[in-house]
Image (cartoon, rainbow, N blue to C red):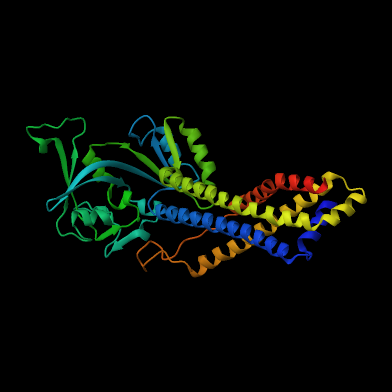
Amino acid sequence: MNLSLYIAKRYLFSKKSHNAINIISGISACGVALATLALVCTLSVFNGFQELVAGLFTAFDPELKITATESKTFDSQDSLVVRVRELPEVEVATLCIEENAMVQYKGRQAVVTIKGVEDNFEQQTEIDSILYGYGNFTLRDEIVDYGILGIQLTSTLGTGIRPIDPIEVYAPKRGQTVNMANPTGSFEQAYLFSPGVVFAVNQEKYDATYILASLDFARRLFDYNTEITSLELKLKEGTNIERVQRNIQKLLGEKFLVQNRYEQQADVFRIMEIEKLISYLFLSFILLVACFNIIGSLSMLIIDKKEDVKTLRNLGADNRLIVRVFFTEGCLISLVGALIGIVAGIGLCLLQEHYGLIALGSQGGFVVDAYPVSIQAGDVILIFFTVLAMGCLSVWYPVKYLSKRLIN
């Protein structure tokens, strides 16, 4: 065993001549442990919220979404697009058209995004899990076209879940400018009935502006033939999404963009990552302050062990060994604090995950009742090495300086 480590371990766990040294060392380790616990819990809560948001988008966004990079639309009968739809890893491929339109219901108006999808959209996503009402997922029949509104949009228009009258939909005629003498003649007009359900993604982007309709309805309204704005893919279970994404991107080339779920909501997740990083930096600063408390306990320990240092010098120990002993002592205090904080943080997160100890607010007022948590091994490893690095760096120079004063 390394001599400096052996002596430092004896100093850490043995009883000192002054009880105050033991108390201060314990307080120093507790300070590091509390800062470490705060890091574990905070980062786990951010992970929990990120997974919660990702779960909400899962019911609406596809696993992979293909769009054109140089134009708004592309031909669904393009040979490359057909090859992608026929890939063995693809379970469901859905043609989609997303365009803006204006809707009106009994004098109330709103600008919305009409998302026209094929009938297999129900197999493409978990849309059934976010539908509310007394009807079914139906976009058309032999007589009328149906539209499924976001829950906030129903409030804006005052339609309710099952409006009696149809919703009027207006879209500018393709390739024409608005005729000010006859503005209504410059718009395509169509009607959407309600199937008796609305969807709630719990994201304003969707709930306040989106209407799901059939692909045929969108093509008639926006005067499209074989053009689409996106191709959405659901892959077979067990498929490596990243590998398939890279292969499809390579097949389609630079004229197309292939995005996974996180990339489709890049702005939302980027903000969450920035918030997580800022929290990590702030808590790391608090951890650094806690690590400086170790210097006090080491200073008293150095004074307490004057006679031991003399004995070591008489036995042939050089100055570097003496410095290493007290430096290792400081690192061991950081290590003990890190291990206690990580174990306590993981335990607290597990209790929160299973029992919801800390609630978000009034019951039913949020998507979840308690703070969501998710412990990730990468975060735990990062926190462990952060604590060790800050603990060792914070005591290196003070220990070197104090030890030299003692030796002299």
- Give left or right: position of 280 versus 127: right
Q: Is residue 150 above or below residue 176?
A: below
Residue 2 appears anywhere in the view: no
Q: Is residue 77 above or below residue 386?
A: above
Furthest toward the left, the residue is: 181
- Give left or right: position of 71 versus 261: left
Residue in front for this viewpoint, 276 or 90 = 276
Furthest toward the right, the residue is: 315
- Give left or right: position of 192 versus 238: left
Residue at image x 54%, y 59%? 41
Residue at image x 51%, y 66%? 352
Residue 393 image position (x, y, % from top left): 68, 46
Residue 294 appears anywhere in the view: yes
Residue 188 image position (x, y, % from top left): 16, 40
Residue 106 image position (x, y, % from top left): 12, 53
The quarter in which the C terminus is drawn is top right
Residue in front for this viewpoint, 83 or 406 = 406
Q: Quadrant of residue 72?
A: top left
The quarter in which the N terminus is drawn is bottom right
Residue at image x 37%, y 60%? 129
Q: Is residue 352 above or below residue 167?
A: below
Residue at image x 80%, y 49%? 406
- Give left or right: position of 113 versus 29: left
Residue 335 image position (x, y, % from top left): 69, 56
Residue in front for this viewpoint, 240 or 21 = 21
How many numbered circles does the render carry? Answer: 0
